[in-house]
Amino acid sequence: MDQTTLPAIDLPGLPEVSLKALEACRNGEGHRAIAAILASDTGLTARILALANSSLYGRCGTIRSLDQALLRLGTRQIETLVLTAALQQLMQELGSEQWQQLRDFWRHSLTSALLAKALATLTRYPEPAEAFLLGMLHNIGELVALREPDPEQRQRLLQHHPLLAARLAEAWGLGAMAADAMRHQQAPPDDIGDASHLVKLINLSTRLAQSDAAGLHSAMTVFDLGEELTLEIKRRIDQEVDAFALMLDIPLDGDYSPKSGQQALRQTVAEQALLEQAQPAASQQHSLQQAAATLTLITGLPALSFGIRDDALVLLGRSHGDLPAMTLDAEPAHSALTRAHAEGKPATVSADSATVLDQQLLGLLGTAALIALPVATEGQSFGVLALGLSRPEHPVPALATRYCQRLARALALPQPGPDTLPAATAALQRQIHEISNPLTIVRQYVHQLQHRALADDLQQDLTVIREELERASRLLLQLGQPDTPDTRPATDAVELNSELIALQPLFRDSLFSNDDRVLALDLCPVAADITVPRSQLRQLIINLVRNAAEALGDRGRVWLRTITPVWQNGQRWVELSVEDDGPGLPPGVQQRLFQPVSSTKGCGHSGLGLSITKQLVDDMEGHISCRTGDSGTQFRILLPAADLPDHSRQTQASADD
């Protein structure tokens, strides 16, 4: 097998699993219910695990269960991932024999995983979820081989699939023990008597899943489990797999055909695409005005949309024709429209049972029947949509109900006032602002590397590039999910002077390339060790130096100074000072110094820099103060000194004119 490459994680899967996973995401089921569905499919598990443990998420703690992966990625991200997998599955071309193999592979993988989890619990392995995950992934090489067109390469993959699984475990950061469990899954039972617990679990579970006498012998050899107990465990797991297959509508007996599952999945994917195109607008009034036209677009049926104003229902939109003025009392709830509003559930009416109001609505719709669909969520009502039907027994399009649910969820989000910026929007702008800094560093370092020969400090430069790329990736994650928990690694001691020296060439080549603009370092002669995250420290320095340089105009000087120790309130600090000789901060900025303001720097600036700087200092449990005037501006930052035994080390830093 090729030792240089790993397979792309676009593996085949049963359409029934993707269908159920999308339905669970769409219905807002809990992450555990969604994880249970996804965990039954090796291909989907591999996709999610690879993404959750990727550098995009900082690799802050390895993910060793689907529950953890869902918490890290979020339901919205998982839904997008499953939708992408579904599109690829719909395009995969497998023969009838391959579909049979895929169904049998699904059953064997799920059986192995459930056996691994049960055995882990029985033998008191501390991480049963990890055992389940490895049991699901142990034969991923067989899944890779299933889509391989070359017979020789397919046979090599089948022969070496334990090695492939081990390499994937290493690539995803699952640890050496997980990789060993994959690598030795087919080792003879007599050879693993003194192996790690995890190796024994995966080895035994995969053998028991085969339902042969060798598995019973292995149970006795590996864990001293009697035949009766082993058979009972296997029987219960088989029942659990059968029940799960029934829930997913996967037939385990006889021939398997994917046609019905693919047809349902194709319809679900198409509906999802339509709903994405019909994403409700942020404004409540605008959303309800457009809702009637949107509902007609995705269902092909005429519609009316009513909003709530002063406890009355007001006609806001119509899919065709002029929009008459119509304001209705919400009570008494006799018509289908008012019943749907009062009861929070759909109400249907036809011409032979219509009230006067119903008859008016039927006239506007031009149909013989209608269904009123409430736009409501969690007891909060925003309006009602009336959808025209050709007859009372006409089935209500599932898209219509899903659109009303999505519209209600969108309207339930905080609505911005005329003079306020929503918290989510402010967080979004903050991330956008901060993305520009690390990407600027990356571009500048790449530029430097392209124009010079290899030097001794090349590895240090490459390290800066890698760290800044990872920080940009984390910021992009937070941009998509502002509520994502901060999973940065634990803080280690950082030497402030060394960081300033490392960043100095970058600043000189970018912000101070003009000879009339000077960056000067005045660093203390002893090590300035501080207990802050390195990425946050660099972000703080970049923000302050960038602001100071931009304040200079075409000429001027910026000083970076460090002092240690500084004692304040009985605590030892390291002081960082960033000072420029520019014109000083404008009065409007001074009044709202560390709050988001409209930038005075023109296009490309958001006015968020100093507010972010203050937040960074607060996060590092430091203090920041500012002095500004006609002769320039100085920011003084106190950062907590590291509790290191030796502070007499001389730094290599020296003052730089």
Image (cartoon, grey):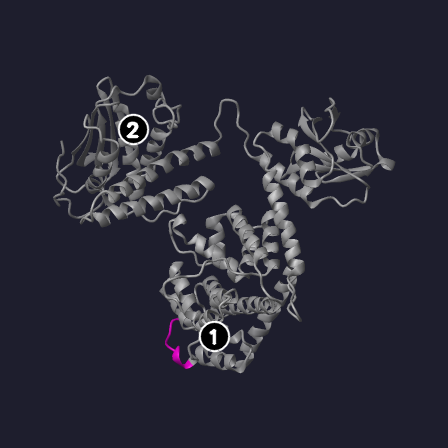
Left or right of 171? Residue 248 is right
Left or right of 650? Residue 134 is right
Q: Which residue is mark 1?
A: 204
Compared to residue 550, the image places residue 24 above or below, namely below
Q: Residue 257 or 72: which is nearer the viewer?
A: 257
Q: Secondary structure at mark 2?
A: helix
Q: Mark 1, mark 2: which one is toward the viewer?
A: 2
Q: Residue at x 74, y 27 (%)?
A: 321
Identify the main secondary structure in magenta: loop
**Magenta residues, start to end:** 190-196
Q: Secondary structure at mark 1?
A: helix
For disc 1, the neighbor class at 10 Å (few under 14, some 14 to 19, many from 20) is many
Left or right of 93? Residue 217 is left
Residue 379 seen in the current view: no
Q: Amino acid at mark 1?
A: Leu
Residue 472 seen in the current view: yes
Give percent across and percent down for residue 456.
18, 49
Q: Quadrant of residue 606?
A: top left
Compared to residue 42, the image places residue 348 above or below, namely above
Q: Residue at x 27, y 20 (%)?
A: 584
Quadrant where the N terminus is found in the figure: bottom left
Quadrant where the C terminus is found in the figure: top left
Compared to residue 328, the image places residue 265 above or below, namely below
Give percent across and percent down for residue 448.
24, 41
Q: Which residue is mark 2?
A: 547
Q: Amino acid at mark 2?
A: Asn
Q: Residue 393 or 158: which is nearer the viewer?
A: 158
For disc 2, the neighbor class at 10 Å (few under 14, some 14 to 19, many from 20) is some
Inspect the magenta stretch and tell me whether residue 497 lies in it. Answer: no
Task: Give how far apart the Cα atoms at labels 1 and 2 are.
Answer: 62 Å
Compared to residue 326, the image places residue 385 above or below, namely below
